[in-house]
Image (tube, rainbow, N blue to C red):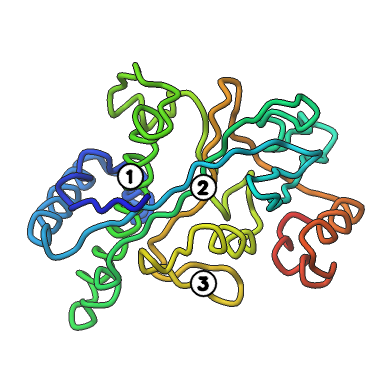
Amino acid sequence: MILRYEIHELAAYINWPYFFHAWQLHDKTRQMQLQQEAEQLLSEYDGRYAANAMFQIMEANSDGDDIVLDGGRRLPLLRQQEERSKMLCLADFVRPLSSGKKDMVGLFATSVDQGMETDFDDDQYKKMMMQLLADRLAEAAAERMHQEVRTRYWGYAPQEQLTMEELHAEKFQGIRPAVGYPSLPDTSLNFVIDELLDMKQIGIQLTESGAMRPHASVSGLMISHPQSCYFSLGRIGMDQLSDYAARRGMTVVQTRKFLQSNL
């Protein structure tokens, strides 16, 4: 499924504190002024640029620390290993193969029209503004898409009625862990997601490191389990690194490059 959102359809979903954080701006008055300026820019370019989202909902089960997708494609994941952690893995929130019952998992990607990042080289201040707004719009597209998935397309929470503040506070059922974030730090998983979604359909290209272009892009998983939660993977040992490399079909040396900050 591919969705396209005009800027005015996403404006209410923008999480402004992250925008202010990118500017390292803490003064409330200046924040308000900057938001007004940003909203004026969004209004000015509404209709010229838009955001795109795509997702696929697939039958799935967990098998150890892997999620096994419909068709047998495996999505290897990592488990917390530090003693002070709860030893969580995202696969814990998907029904195991041993249950004999199918579960569901969603894959997604969102991005913005590339021009938002490339069309303002003659004005460095506007270029920075538009790049940061592009980041917020990609995240806003993920927020709105996930809301529509929960209530309509997947439909596991059809009665959900949350305010925007509750959405930003993640009061909904399920989680949307993104690649490169604390519970899913291995950006090489983008290659697996790309195989299944074909992200170039919404203009996303992958670098050799698995980074996405445009930079204002988000990809990841959608999990519906009522007790699912976000967590930080933290440090892992060489034992898990070796096991994960084998499950990813890569060498330890290759895998280490993607997980250096977690070793």
- Mark before the other along the chain sequence, 2 or 3: 2
- Mark before the other along the chain sequence, 1 or 3: 1
**Furthest residue to the top?**
159
Marks 1 and 3, how far apart in space?
Answer: 34 Å
Q: Nearer the viewer, mark 2 or mark 3?
A: 2
Task: Look at label 1 and name its amino acid.
Answer: His
Q: Which mark is residue 107?
A: 2
Location of residue 113 by image quarter: bottom left
Instruction: Locate residue 223 relative to residue 67 in the image: left or right.
Output: left
Location of residue 209 by image quarter: bottom right
Tell me which residue sits at (66%, 31%) in the image. 94
Q: Nearer the viewer, mark 1 or mark 2?
A: 2
Tell me which residue sits at (39%, 55%) in the image. 110
Residue behind mark 1: 26
Residue 114: image x %, image y %?
Answer: 30, 71
**Furthest residue to the right?**
239
Per the image, label 2 sits on a secondary structure element best described as strand
Marks 1 and 2, how far apart in space?
Answer: 35 Å
Task: Look at label 2 and name its amino acid.
Answer: Leu
Residue 210: image x %, image y %?
Answer: 58, 68
Nearest to the observer: residue 26 or residue 98 = 98
Task: Look at label 3 and name its amino acid.
Answer: Leu
Nearest to the observer: residue 236 or residue 148 = 148
Is 44 above or below relative to 8? below
- Mark before the other along the chain sequence, 1 or 2: 1
Which quarter shows the C terminus? bottom right
